[in-house]
Image (cartoon, coloured by chain):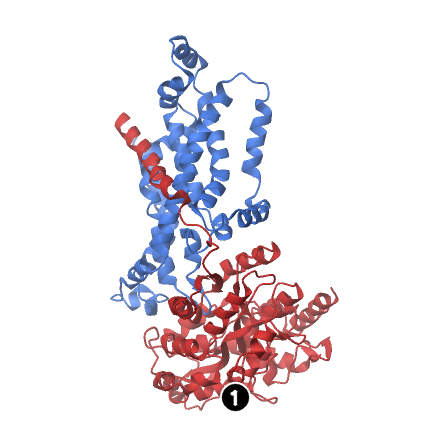
Chain colours: A red, B blue
């Protein structure tokens, strides 16, 4: 008995004593050498960027401490750092949908002079860059722009004797023909959230001519309960409930990706980062059967989704020069080309990257016209696909909840849009 | 006689069946995680019978190559150090509170409880700001001190209860025989309160080991602990379920031997029995 006791006691003590020595070891930035602290959230291009950090130091002599964390971790850390005025971060991952809110709160440093001073500014895709302009000033540099595409199984569409749907009305027909007991016709994100169902649903909305506001940005009267939006919502509900996989009512990107890769769904319409996982031979069982195409359109044309991510500099940064050096390096043609080659998605934000033969060869290998499709979709995409207003995160979340409730049958489509309209009004009034 | 015995057997069998069913139910998530950790990405969401041959060690390899092992080590270092610190400070503190004749014990006990009751979210922002100014962000020292704010009140509280069960006469006898107070504590009181000590150590280690919130706020890449590192496998447009499964196992495994080893003492201590 006593022996066991001693052992237990030593075990407990050992756990601690191995630890006392290094207690004071690594610390935060030693001020003498030039360093930048970079906070990014995890996606292939940011992980790729972190892997290239040594290149940055070799080129500039500045050490980049790049922290790549999960999205939830990112949000807690950055909110605390901003609200506390901690100035512990020099370069921050700035999703375009947050930029208005962050600028309104005074959290970002303008970068207009530096960006205008870039010799190759014209090479930056103007849509993504202009999205970072708030009342005349740039507050970020885009490094990633993903756009909406459709992925479909050519074998299943052929077997069903149907063509590729060009409109959402045609999509209803095609889905009906393709849907089988083994494979659902279509899987899209339904989970509520401004970056989840409200990333994909506006593609249907806008194709039918639906809008969020009466006339963005001049007349900001909510217009979510329009007949066009109702039509779009009904199409979405039918597609998901009648031709979607089981449990679709809570599908988010991991479920959509898994359904495509494992042959449980024949089609999806989503961002490049999702659809490219369907054509990725390393992860998808049906990579050779999936074909990428433009998303379906409607009476108002096609409106591919767009998501832009960039780099910003927190307000009051004591290290702004070194921080912009990092931003410049991270969004340079050279770095973006390396990322497009090393990682899975072609979501670069400079036109010159598409001229790089290595980049061309890599994506032609996935699908002959992949890069052209992307450019076409980016050209079609509305800069304000998701309205560029400070309250969008709340508005998007509110609409997303109601749209999700309608798909799950908790309220009728009409009720859902009415409720969304009311919530938009109260958020805007506040 | 025979009837009752049959009835008894049936009852017993039913009891076992229920216990087994409940055991299976409780263990299902664990079994599932183990299975997930050994399946390739393409077979993760399939029933096993559809691809019975699809097994892989890739998830384990990719975890081994990632930052996760370093995060696991960080967890050990910080949870271990803060436990040790809490025991070093807390045990003599609890001894004093238990054996000293003082009038303000009621106040002290409430203060301690209050520390245990206050949700960390209430003081994390001030803590964060102080840490930023003091340069304690992303340091072991910073995280260990933060964890000690969890573990110390716990150690004091639970050791206080353990020491209370040791008769004062034992302490007095020691002092009477000429031992110093420290010697009495070390030679007489602590051995007598061993189950409580082991339980306090193990439970406070777990308290720090399982922490997510402090690590989330005050660590960066150098000192991130394992529970936060697990979250980093949830990324934009993809979730690495295989890696999360392996990481969850890696996060649980080190705890198992500790619990098994200390189980007896924890039960004794929680049951309130002290063996002399």
Q: Could you say where residue A309 lies in the image, as x and y percent from the top left?
A: 52, 72
Quarter holding residue A159: bottom left
- Along the line of sight, which residue is nearer the eye, A146 or A85? A85
Q: Could you say where residue A311 lies in the image, as x and y percent from the top left?
A: 52, 70
Count of marks placed on residues: 1
Whether B4 is drawn above or below B78: the answer is: above
For the C terminus of chain B, which image quadrant?
Answer: top left
Query: Judging from the image, what secondary structure is the residue with disc 1 in?
Result: helix
Q: Could you say where residue A142 lies in the image, as x and y percent from the top left?
A: 52, 75
Q: Is residue A291 left or right of residue A298?
A: left
- Along the line of sight, which residue is nearer the eye, B132 or A94? B132
The answer to whether residue B27 is visible is: no
For the N terminus of chain B, which image quadrant?
Answer: top left
Question: How many other residues sit within 10 Å of disc 1, few (<14), some (14-19) or many (≥20)?
Answer: some
**Residue that lies at the very extreme toward the left in this rendered image:** B53
Mark 1 lies on residue? A170
The answer to whether residue B189 is visible is: yes
Quarter holding residue B68: bottom left
Tell me the chain of label 1.
Answer: A
Whether B47 is drawn above or below A263: the answer is: above
């Amino acid at each position: 008995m006593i022996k066991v006791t001693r052992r237990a006691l030593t075990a407990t003590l050992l756990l601690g004593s191995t630890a006392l020595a290094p207690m004071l070891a690594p610390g935060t930035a030693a001020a003498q050498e030039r360093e930048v602290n970079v906070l990014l959230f995890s996606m292939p291009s940011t992980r790729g960027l972190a892997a290239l950090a040594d290149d940055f130091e070799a080129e500039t002599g500045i050490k980049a401490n790049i922290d790549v964390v999960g999205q939830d971790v990112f949000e807690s850390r950055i909110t605390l750092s901003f609200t506390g005025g901690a100035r512990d971060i020099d370069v921050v991952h700035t999703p375009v949908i947050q930029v208005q809110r962050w600028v309104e709160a005074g959290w970002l440093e303008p970068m207009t002079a530096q960006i205008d001073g870039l010799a190759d500014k014209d090479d930056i895709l103007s849509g993504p860059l202009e999205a970072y302009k708030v009342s005349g000033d740039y507050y970020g540099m885009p490094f990633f722009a993903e756009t909406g595409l459709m992925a479909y199984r050519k074998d299943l569409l052929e077997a069903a004797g149907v063509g590729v749907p060009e409109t959402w009305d045609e999509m209803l027909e095609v889905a009906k023909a393709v849907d089988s007991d083994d494979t659902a016709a279509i899987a899209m994100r339904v989970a509520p959230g401004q970056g989840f169902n409200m990333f994909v649903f506006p593609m249907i909305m806008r194709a039918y001519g639906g809008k969020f506001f009466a006339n963005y940005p001049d007349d900001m009267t909510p217009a979510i309960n329009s007949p066009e939006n109702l039509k779009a919502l009904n199409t979405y509900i039918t597609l998901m409930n009648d031709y979607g996989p089981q449990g679709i009512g809570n599908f988010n990107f991991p479920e959509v990706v898994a359904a495509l890769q494992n042959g449980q769904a024949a089609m999806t319409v989503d961002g490049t980062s999702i659809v490219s996982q369907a054509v990725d031979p390393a992860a998808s069982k049906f990579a050779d059967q999936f074909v990428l195409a433009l998303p379906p359109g409607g009476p108002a044309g096609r409106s591919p989704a767009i998501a832009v991510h960039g780099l910003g500099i927190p307000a009051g940064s004591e290290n702004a020069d070194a921080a912009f050096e990092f931003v410049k390096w991270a969004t340079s043609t050279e770095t973006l080309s390396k990322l497009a080659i090393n990682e899975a998605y072609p979501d670069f934000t400079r036109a010159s990257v598409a001229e790089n033969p290595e980049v061309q060869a890599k994506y032609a290998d996935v699908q002959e016209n992949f890069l052209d499709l992307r450019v076409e979709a980016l050209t079609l995409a509305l800069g304000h696909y998701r309205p560029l207003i400070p309250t969008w995160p709340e508005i998007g979340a509110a609409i997303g909840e109601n749209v999700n409730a309608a798909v799950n049958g908790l309220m009728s489509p009409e009720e859902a849009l009415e409720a969304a309209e009311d919530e938009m009004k109260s958020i805007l009034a506040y | 006689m025979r009837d009752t015995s049959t009835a008894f057997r049936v009852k017993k069998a039913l009891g076992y069946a229920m216990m087994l069913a409940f055991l299976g139910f409780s263990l299902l998530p664990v079994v599932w995680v183990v299975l997930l950790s050994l399946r390739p990405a393409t077979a993760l969401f399939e029933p096993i019978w559809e691809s019975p041959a699809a097994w892989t060690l890739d998830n384990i390899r990719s975890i081994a190559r990632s930052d996760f092992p370093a995060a696991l080590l960080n967890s050990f270092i910080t949870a271990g150090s803060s436990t040790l610190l809490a025991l070093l400070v807390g045990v003599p503190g609890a001894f004093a509170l238990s054996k000293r004749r003082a009038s303000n014990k009621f106040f002290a006990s409430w203060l301690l409880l209050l520390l245990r009751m206050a949700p960390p979210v209430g003081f994390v922002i001030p803590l964060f700001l102080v840490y930023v100014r003091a340069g304690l962000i992303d340091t072991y020292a910073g995280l260990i001190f933060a964890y000690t704010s969890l573990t110390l009140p716990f150690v004091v509280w639970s050791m206080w209860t353990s020491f209370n069960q040791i008769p004062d006469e034992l302490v007095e006898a020691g002092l009477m025989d000429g031992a110093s107070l420290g010697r009495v504590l070390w030679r007489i009181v602590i051995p007598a309160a061993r189950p409580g000590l082991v339980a306090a150590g193990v439970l406070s280690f777990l308290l720090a080991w399982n922490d997510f919130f402090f690590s989330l706020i005050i660590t960066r890449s150098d000192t991130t602990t394992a529970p936060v590192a697990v979250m980093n496998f949830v990324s934009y447009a993809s979730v690495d379920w295989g890696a999360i499964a392996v990481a969850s196992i890696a996060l649980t495994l080190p705890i198992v031997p500790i619990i098994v080893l200390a189980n007896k003492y924890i039960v004794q201590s929680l049951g309130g029995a002290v063996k002399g």
